[in-house]
Image (spheres, rainbow, N blue to C red):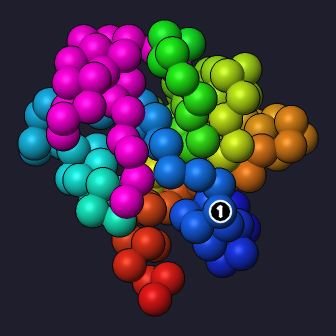
Amino acid sequence: MYADTDTIRKILTQSGDTWAVVGLSNNPSRAAYGVAAVLQRFGKRVVPVHPKAEPVHGEQGYASLADIPFPVDVVDVFVNSDLAGGVADEATAIGAKAVWFQLGVIDEQAYARTRAAGLDMVMDRCPAIEIPQLG
């Protein structure tokens, strides 16, 4: 319901190549670290967003979406569901084209707000799983 094939394809192929990954740190045991590497392999620029603002995968990190000094196309969210809505609102505020909530990240109200603001959105899916299936 929150991840139709057309929207997934559009985000992965047409929404742009700059992805802010919220929750991405330099911890290789975290899912965000591996997913970011997959996105890079498929040509996406991955921008780490984490309170530590540390570089990850060769890209400078930022403490918040608002701190990123260039346009972001997609915001990929690896935070707990109770924090995800605020991130989606920040994504709208910075002018992102799309928001992607990772597996297990669910906030139906945030989904409705984000879609109503005109952004594409996918919830409870993983781009690292979806992108290889595009063919």
Give the camera-side residue of 71 and 28. 71
Residue 106 lies, in percent from the top left, at: 58, 46
Q: Give the range drawn in magenta.
A: 43-65
Secondary structure state at the residue bearing disc 1 = loop
Give the camera-side residue of 123 and 11. 11
What residue sits 37% from the left and 16% below the top? 62
Horizontally, is 79 left or right of 61 in the view? right
Q: Does the magenta stretch include residue 124?
A: no
- Circle 1 sits on which residue? 14
Residue 69 lies, in percent from the top left, at: 51, 15
What residue sits 72% from the left and 36% below the top? 110
Secondary structure that dominates the magenta span: loop
Horizontally, is 114 left or right of 73 in the view? right
Q: Can residue 89 be seen in this view?
A: no
Q: Is residue 60 magenta?
A: yes
Residue 107 lies, in percent from the top left, at: 64, 40
The image shows residue 54, relative to residue 118, as above or below, that is above
What residue sits 18% from the left and 39% below the top? 57
Q: Which residue lies furthest to the left in this view?
A: 28
What residue sits 59% from the left and 29% below the top? 71
Give the camera-side residue of 73 and 83. 73
Residue neighbourhood size for the residue with mark 1, other residues' Cα within 10 Å, grouped as few (<14), some (14–19), many (≥20): few
The image shows residue 68, relative to residue 80, as above or below, that is above
